[in-house]
């Protein structure tokens, strides 16, 4: 496992939407509930905010979530680089009283970060993940590509949470 991807994901704590009365964006909200069993499995990154820890990733970015015996979640992130593939394995735990929509993810102890599900299709075909500071954002799909109308729903979920999508970068997915 390369440290570069691990460091980025360790930092994972992840245009205009809802605003508070003072003109500042309202606090980021998660979806009300995430059924962990349905969320587990493989996700393809469709788009993200550029992040230091993913600086060597040039495409084929995936995240695979599986349940561990201790009840925590195994997180395996993978991406294609100019030199092959890079992987980082971490652990996540569901934040108490979050309806399963907030996770704390760690790729290297003792550091962990916020991973909040802020948008989710009813059929769990796509998800939008961010953090309370709006520094991180990922649009994820169960398939390597999303129809444009579905992508727009995911983008709108981020906008509704006050994310400025000007910095959003789309991920090349060549594999299945």
Image (tube, rainbow, N blue to C red):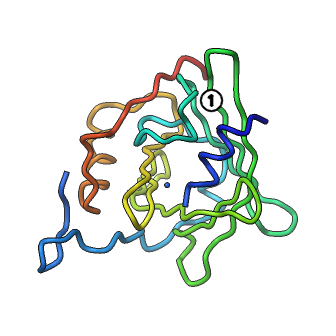
Query: What is the residue that sits farthest to the right in this orientation?
Result: 69
Q: Give how far across and how far down residue 130 sits, in percent.
A: 44, 57
Please give left or right for residue 102 compared with residue 21 in the image.
right
Q: Nearer the viewer, residue 118 or 91?
A: 91
Camera-side residue of 141 and 107:
107
Q: Which residue does the image show at 62% across and 67% down from the upper left?
A: 104
Quarter of image, res 163: bottom left
Image coords of residue 110 (percent x, y): 74, 66
Q: Residues within 10 Å of mark 1 (few under 14, many from 20)?
A: many
Residue at 41% from the left image edge and 67% from the top image edge = 132
Q: Position of residue 34 (x, y in %)?
A: 53, 66
User: From the image, which quarter does the N terminus lie in?
Assistant: top right
Q: Secondary structure at mark 1?
A: strand
Left/right placement of residue 113 relative to residue 66 reads left
Task: Name above or below for residue 105 compared with residue 32.
Answer: above
- Residue 20 placement: quadrant: bottom left
Query: Image check: 159 left or right of 56?
Result: left
Residue hosting label 1: 79
Where on the picture, by quarter, is residue 175? Answer: top right
Give me the residue at 52% from left, 68% from top: 101
Query: Which quadrant holds the C terminus?
Result: top right
Percent x, y of residue 125? 48, 45
């Amino acid at each position: 496992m390369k440290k570069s991807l691990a460091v980025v994901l360790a930092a994972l704590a992840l245009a205009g939407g809802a605003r508070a009365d003072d003109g500042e964006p309202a606090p980021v909200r998660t979806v009300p509930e995430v059924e962990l069993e349905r969320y587990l499995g493989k996700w393809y990154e469709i788009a993200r905010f550029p992040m230091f820890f993913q600086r060597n990733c040039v495409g084929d970015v995936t995240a695979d979530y599986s349940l561990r015996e201790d009840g925590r979640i195994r997180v395996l992130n993978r991406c294609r680089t100019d030199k092959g593939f890079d992987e980082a394995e971490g652990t996540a735990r569901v934040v108490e009283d979050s309806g399963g929509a907030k996770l704390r993810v760690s790729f290297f102890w003792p550091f962990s970060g916020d991973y909040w599900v802020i948008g989710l299709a009813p059929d769990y075909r796509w998800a939008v993940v961010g953090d309370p500071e709006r520094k991180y954002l990922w649009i994820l799909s169960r398939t390597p590509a999303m129809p444009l109308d579905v992508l727009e729903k995911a983008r709108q979920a981020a906008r509704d949470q006050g994310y400025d999508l000007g910095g959003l970068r789309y991920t090349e997915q060549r594999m299945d």
